[in-house]
Image (spheres, helix red, strand yellow):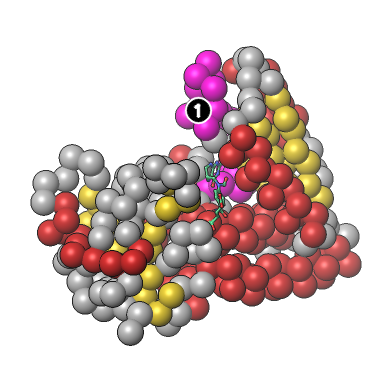
């Protein structure tokens, strides 16, 4: 019997807590504020940005969306980031990815004040995560949301064998760090990994974030394993599917996230959570 991890339900619970936290902050004279910058007209990015804005407003936050043309230069984007770095009403700054090719993404990440880095991508914050630095700092929202889901379903990574397939800055690397800090034994695999499927089968916790539809199926999963599918791929019919073949995987897994309705909803809920925390840390010194 497999348990389907309901990311929508966990996100709802997180959002309910955020709504209360925001109301309390507003009473103390602090309204958490987020600025989302989008460059160009990528339709999926526009939907994600619209969803972030709507959710932030619904939870009582101050939310600004800055839509820029695809021809925006590096200097123009840097100037806008500097503007939000100096804006006291904004606690979190997010530059939606992907960015057009004339923009140097690492330099943009570096330009955001680490204290307003709501994505948790700034090297200062990544460094703190990797070193398990004490204190408060933002952590990438997708992997952090996955940790919240594991916690909600009573899955403790300590002592478990975890395999993370994917080594991106957004998911794979911070996921591996979070699982390591939670005392799992972690292997990071990727497109050049030999015997990938055999390795996947050793995992008690398997996180798949490759962008390859149905890379992993039930044959590659240990009986009873927890399977977290970060993929958001389109199949030949344009249907949204994950990196895991859900139908065969759920015959073997103990716990599994669906696509859609698993990791995705948690990303936005956790982004809201991080925005509230940044506001508390900066304005209340918590
Ligand atoms: N600066 C950032 N850019 C991007 C990030 C990010 O975290 N920071 N992540 C992704 C896109 N993304 C948020 O930005 C995101 C994508 C998808 C979902 C989601 O809820 N997905 C749903 C399905 C939606 C559908 O039907 O198409 C789900 O999985 O249930 C949330 C956030 C890239 N860019
Ligand atoms: Mg999902």
Q: Is residue 20 above or below residue 119?
A: below
The answer to whether mark 1 is within 8 Å of ligand 1 is no
Residue 229 appears in view: yes
Per the image, the residue denoted by label 1 is 105
Q: Residue at x 16, y 45 (%)?
A: 193
Point out residue 27 in the picture as x, y percentages from the top left corner: 88, 67
Q: Is residue 109 magenta?
A: yes
Question: Residue 160's quadrant in the figure?
Answer: bottom left
Q: Quadrant for the C terminus, please.
A: bottom right
Question: Residue 61's quadrant in the figure?
Answer: bottom right
Seen in the image, is 198 located left or right of residue 168? left
Q: Residue at x 19, y 62 (%)?
A: 220
Q: Residue at x 32, y 59 (%)?
A: 245
* In front of the other: 213 or 58: 213
Q: Residue at x 51, y 40 (%)?
A: 122
Q: Quadrant for the N terminus, please.
A: bottom left
Point out residue 210 in the picture as x, y percentages from the top left corner: 34, 46
* In front of the other: 221 or 24: 221
Point out residue 4 in the picture as x, y percentages from the top left corner: 43, 75
Total tally of numbered discs in the picture: 1
Seen in the image, is 63 located left or right of residue 197? right
Q: Is residue 124 magenta?
A: no
Point out residue 178 in the picture as x, y percentages from the top left corner: 39, 61
Report the magenta residues as a range. 98-120
Mark 1 Cα-neighbour bin, 10 Å: few <14, some 14–19, many ≥20: some
Residue farthest to the front, as pictured: 237
Residue farthest to the bottom, as pictured: 1
* Secondary structure beneath label 1: helix
Seen in the image, is 223 located left or right of residue 169? left
Residue 172 appears in view: no
């Amino acid at each position: 019997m497999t348990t389907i991890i309901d990311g929508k339900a966990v996100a709802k619970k997180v959002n309910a807590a955020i709504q209360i936290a925001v109301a309390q902050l507003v009473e103390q004279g602090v309204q958490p504020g987020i600025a989302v910058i989008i460059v160009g007209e990528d339709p999926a990015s526009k939907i994600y940005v619209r969803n972030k804005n709507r959710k932030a407003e619904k939870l009582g936050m101050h939310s600004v969306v800055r839509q820029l043309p695809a021809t925006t230069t590096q200097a123009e984007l840097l100037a806008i980031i500097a503007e939000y770095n100096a804006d006291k009403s904004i606690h979190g700054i997010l530059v939606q990815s992907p960015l057009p090719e004339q923009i140097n993404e690492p330099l943009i990440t570096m330009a955001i004040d680490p204290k307003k880095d709501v994505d948790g991508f700034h090297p200062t914050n990544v460094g703190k995560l990797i070193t398990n630095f004490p204190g408060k700092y933002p952590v990438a929202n997708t992997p952090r949301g996955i940790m919240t889901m594991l916690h909600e379903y009573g899955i403790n990574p300590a002592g478990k064998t975890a395999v993370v397939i994917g080594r991106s800055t957004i998911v794979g690397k911070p996921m591996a760090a979070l699982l390591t800090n939670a005392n799992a034994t972690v292997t990071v695999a990727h497109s050049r990994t030999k015997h990938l499927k055999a390795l996947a089968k050793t995992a008690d916790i398997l996180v798949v974030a490759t962008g390859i539809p149905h890379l992993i199926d039930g044959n590659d999963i240990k009986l009873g394993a927890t399977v977290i599918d970060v993929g958001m791929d389109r199949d030949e019919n344009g249907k949204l599917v994950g990196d895991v073949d859900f139908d065969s995987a759920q015959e073997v897994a103990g716990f599994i996230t669906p696509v859609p309705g698993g990791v995705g909803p948690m990303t936005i809920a956790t982004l809201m959570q991080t925005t509230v925390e940044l506001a508390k840390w900066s304005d209340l010194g918590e």
